[in-house]
Structures are given as structure tokens and as C-alpha cells.
Image (cartoon, rainbow, N blue to C red):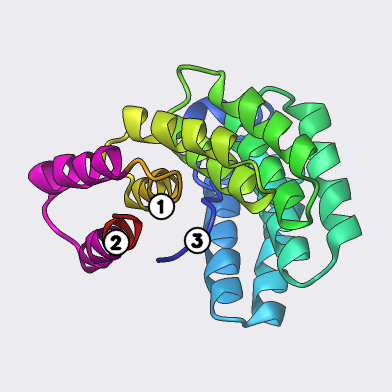
Amino acid sequence: MNKSVVVCLSLCACTLAPHLTQEEVSAADTRISLGIAYLQKNQREKARINLLKAQKVAPLYIRTLMALAYYDDAIGEESQASRQYHQALALYPEQPDLLNNYGTFLCKHNHYQSALRYFRLAYLQTDYINIADSFENAGLCALKSGQKTLARQLFTKAIDYQPGKTLSLFHLVNIESEQKEFTVAEEQIRHYINQFGPTAELAGLQAKIRRTKQQND
């Protein structure tokens, strides 16, 4: 099961910097999309060139700032990425995707309590379209830091907002199984399968729960 957190780089029009024209936004978005695509293919130089072109067109555009921070972190420039995030937060202190992404960055570098604080700032904005992602990311961070009770609460909230969150369900059921709440765990899986159908991961988890129950009988 993929344990990756969700980084949000696609933003609605409401986050556009007011000084930019639509043409500038479109040009920057094109370069950002290309830059991230190249980065995902590990073509770092092409990624850097495209992101710098986005920066030239729209240096204070929030997607530019977030993409540059994401790039710097991906190539191991943690300090530079942190500076990029701080610059963005100074301009857009309440933008939930930015808060989510900074939380993701902090958790990746083991700053767990600070990360959880930024995730909380993101998911407390109830009109946030990606709120389930922030709850899931916070849950993964809590789990990484050994806070299983908190992780359970956060995964539950992620599923409340988006019932198809398979990764949250997987970790939630694992925690419930570890806490010997087998009936609850099995009901969670049945409920998901009734709504979305079976998956190989959940079938494996069901088998694991059955084995664990037998060992505890």
C-alpha cells in the first residue's frame, strides 16, 4: 500500500495573485506543469528551467512559489525549500493547499508537531476542497510519529469527508486490528467493499485480521 502523502499543486482561480493577467497566469501554469512533470521523470535540469521561467513570468504567484519549494525539497535543498515556503506563507498565510504542503514538508523532515499544526490550520477551513487529503496527511504524520490514537481519529475524519479514501481506511483498520477491535475493523472493510468494491489490499488485510483473530482466540 502506497504511504505517500498528498501534495496539492493545483489551485482554484480564487488563489491567483491579483496583479497577474490571465495570460501571465496561463504562461506560468504551463511552465509549472511542465516543470513538475519533468521532475517526476527525474529530469531535474529541464524541471528547473521550466520552473525558473514560471518564476520570471509570475514570481509571487502562489503556484510558482509552491512548485519551487517542492522542487527544492525534491532535489535535497531543504533549507532553500523552507525559505520558499516561508516566503509563500508570508504572502498567503491562510491558503489551505499551502498549509497542507508545508505540513507535508515538515513531516517529511521529522518536525512532527509543527507539521500537525499546519495540517490542522488547513483542515479547519471547512470550505477547503481538499480537506480529506489534509486529514489523511495529518494521520500519516501522526502515525509516523507514533501517535496511533491521534492517527486513528484523523483517518476517521478523512473517511468521513471522503469515504473512498482507501489509504486512510487501510491504516485505520490496521490500527483497529492492532488494538484487537476486530469486529470494528471487519465492519469498516465490509462497508467500504459494499460502496466501492473489493481491492487486493483489503483482501490481504481481511486475511491478516482473520489470522490475528485466530492467534488471539
Residue marked by disc 1? 174
Estimate the spatial distance between the alpha carbons at disc 1 and disc 2, rounded to whole Å: 8 Å
**Residue 194, above or below 46:** above
For the point 20% across and 64% down, the residue is 203
**Disc 3 vs disc 2: which is toward the camera?**
2
Q: Quadrant of the N terminus?
A: bottom left
Q: Which residues are magenta?
A: 182-211
Give, as a three-letter code, the residue at label 1: Asn
Give, as a three-letter code, the residue at label 3: Lys
- Dot label at residue 3: 3
Give, as a three-letter code, the residue at label 2: Leu
Local packing at callout 3 (Cα closer than 10 Å; few below 14, some 14-19, many 20+) is: few
For the point 91% across and 57% down, the residue is 79
For the point 71% across and 43% down, the residue is 102
**Residue 138, above or below 75:** above
x%, y% of residue 13? 49, 31
Q: Sequence order check: which comes first, mark 1 or mark 2?
A: 1
For the point 83% across and 29% down, the residue is 90
Please indicate whether residue 210 sits to the left or right of residue 30 in the image: left
